[in-house]
Image (cartoon, helix red, strand yellow):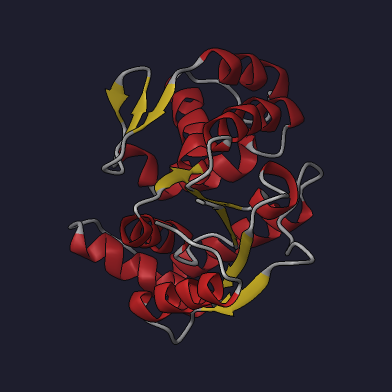
Amino acid sequence: MKINIAIDGPSASGKSTIAKRLANELSYIHIDTGAMYRCVAYLAIKRNIDLSDGETLGKMAETMDIALSVDGKVFLNQTDVTEAIRQEEISVGASKVSIFANVRSAMVRRQQKMAQAKGFIVDGRDIGTVVLPDAEIKIFQTASVASRALRRFKENQNKGLNSDFELLKNEIEQRDYQDTHRKESPLRKAEDAIEIDTSEMTVEQVVSKIISLIAERNYFYD
């Protein structure tokens, strides 16, 4: 019997990286919810829509087409935006648009429908509390601001992008504040979630830890 795994945590804590690796290890499907909100921000910016205009953003979120492929690509209205939505401007914008109830409800409905069949790993900031409160395994993945900024810095360097470490730290701190203080579905740990601090852990160690949790609870994943 397949299960659903919810991974929550702050920005740049490596949720998507772990979710993707777990999906590959367990032959599950990864739903990157953060990418979905980035798509909303990306399209709003492209259309010059004010990111504080919740009504217009909500209407747009209802009609836009978002598709996630098994190889991790993200398509917005049939266009590959996988790399475009990873820019810092879009990451900050995603946090801003996600505060609106109508935007979140549009995205949550899509995510819940996807996960009904089980066998999904879903990461975001309100998965265990709002999107999949009945997920069999819930992880709250954290890391220090410095370690998260360093990861993003190295990631940008590897992509040949100019990056400022101190600026990244400030942006991450700003996003943490936005995510934990927003009115709609703020970032918080579900009561039954297992917290894992990944500051000093490798990807392999985190994946191994979660697989151990699955085994301890006697869940089968193949």
Residue at (48% x, 79% y) in the render: 209
Which is nearer the eye, 154 or 63? 63
The x and y percentages for residue 138 are 63, 62
Q: Is residue 57 above or below residue 10?
A: above
* Vertical order, 202 against 79 (above or below): below
Left or right of residue 162: residue 213: right
Q: Position of residue 180 (x, y in %)?
A: 73, 58
Q: Position of residue 142 (x, y in %)?
A: 58, 72
Q: Could you tell me if residue 186 is visible in this image?
A: yes
Image quarter in which the C terminus is found: bottom left
From the top left corner, tell me how far across and down residue 219 is, in percent: 55, 64
Q: Residue at x 26, y 59 (%)?
A: 162
The answer to which of 206 and 64 lies nearer the viewer is 206
Which quadrant of the view contains residue 26? bottom left
**Is 7 positioned to the left or the right of 72 in the image?**
right
Compared with residue 7, is residue 65 higher up or lower down, i.e. above or below? above
In this view, the residue in front, 135 or 74, is 135
| Camera-side residue of 79 and 194 | 194
Considering only vertical position in the picture, is 53 above or below 178?
above
